[in-house]
Image: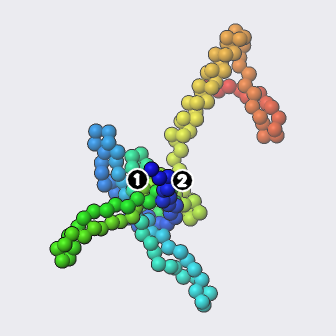
């Protein structure tokens, strides 16, 4: 098996709203797709900037990534997509009635996000904040339990590094 993967890094604008193509049933994954338009700009002989020919690429997002893309990305939004290039091939009837092989290249995304170089965005980080808060509470509880076992009746002393690089006592939040 080869380790040669056609990795893709796309920066462009979403041409349409993401659409759910396959709704995961019985725990199966969901497939969400959208198209991205990319082009390059160049300076013409007259010194004016001109747009090059656009290139359109379909992006496939599976599972939770597809759910998040469907809830976040909208038509016209500047996005960054990371994934691998995949080729789909199928048989179709040609104009003369003969069987013709058709194919298309797509990007199977592993990461999709807003292009922060193009605009400001508001990111909902509630889940990450909740996880960090739960982790911090667990650390404080463990410190309290350890302190109670070593010094019954005293309160825990947590030490952190202040803005000036000096150690300072941190008051626990319980």
**Element under disc 2:** loop
Residue at the top extreme of this rendering: 152
Circles 2 and 1, Cβ within 8 Å, touching? The answer is no
Residue 97, position as x, y percentages in the image: 17, 74
On-image quarter of the C terminus: top right
Q: Mark 1 points at which residue?
A: 61
Q: Mark 2 points at which residue?
A: 122
Residue 46, position as x, y percentages in the image: 60, 90
Relative side of 11 to 148, left or right: left
At horizontal 61% and vertical 30% (from top left) the residue drawn is: 136
Is 46 rendered above or below residue 117? below
Relative side of 167 to 103, left or right: right
Quarter holding residue 169: top right
At horizontal 77% and vertical 34% (from top left) the residue drawn is: 161
Relative side of 165 to 150, left or right: right
Residue at the left extreme of this rendering: 97
Front in this rendered view, residue 128 or 154: 128
Is 102 rendered above or below residue 22? below
Residue 112, position as x, y percentages in the image: 48, 55
Q: How is the image coloured?
A: rainbow
Is 142 rendered above or below residue 59? above
At horizontal 52% and vertical 79% (from top left) the residue drawn is: 51
At horizontal 43% and vertical 53% (from top left) the residue drawn is: 69
Residue 68 seen: no
**Element under disc 1:** strand
**Comparing labels 2 and 1, the label whose residue is closer to the camera:** 1
């Amino acid at each position: 098996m080869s380790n040669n993967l056609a990795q893709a890094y796309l920066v462009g604008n979403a041409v349409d709203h993401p659409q759910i193509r396959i709704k995961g049933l019985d725990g199966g994954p969901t497939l969400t797709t959208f198209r991205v338009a990319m082009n390059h700009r160049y300076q013409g002989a007259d010194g004016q900037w001109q747009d090059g020919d656009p290139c359109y690429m379909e992006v496939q997002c599976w599972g939770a990534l597809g759910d998040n893309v469907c809830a976040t990305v909208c038509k016209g939004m500047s996005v960054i997509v990371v994934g691998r290039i995949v080729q789909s091939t199928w048989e179709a009837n040609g104009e003369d009635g003969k069987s013709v092989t058709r194919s298309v290249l797509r990007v199977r995304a592993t990461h999709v996000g807003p292009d922060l170089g193009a605009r400001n965005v508001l990111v909902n980080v509630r889940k990450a904040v909740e996880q960090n808060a739960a982790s911090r509470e667990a650390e404080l509880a463990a410190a309290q339990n350890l302190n109670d076992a070593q010094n019954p009746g005293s309160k825990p002393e947590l030490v952190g590094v202040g803005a000036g690089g000096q150690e300072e006592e941190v008051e626990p939040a319980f």
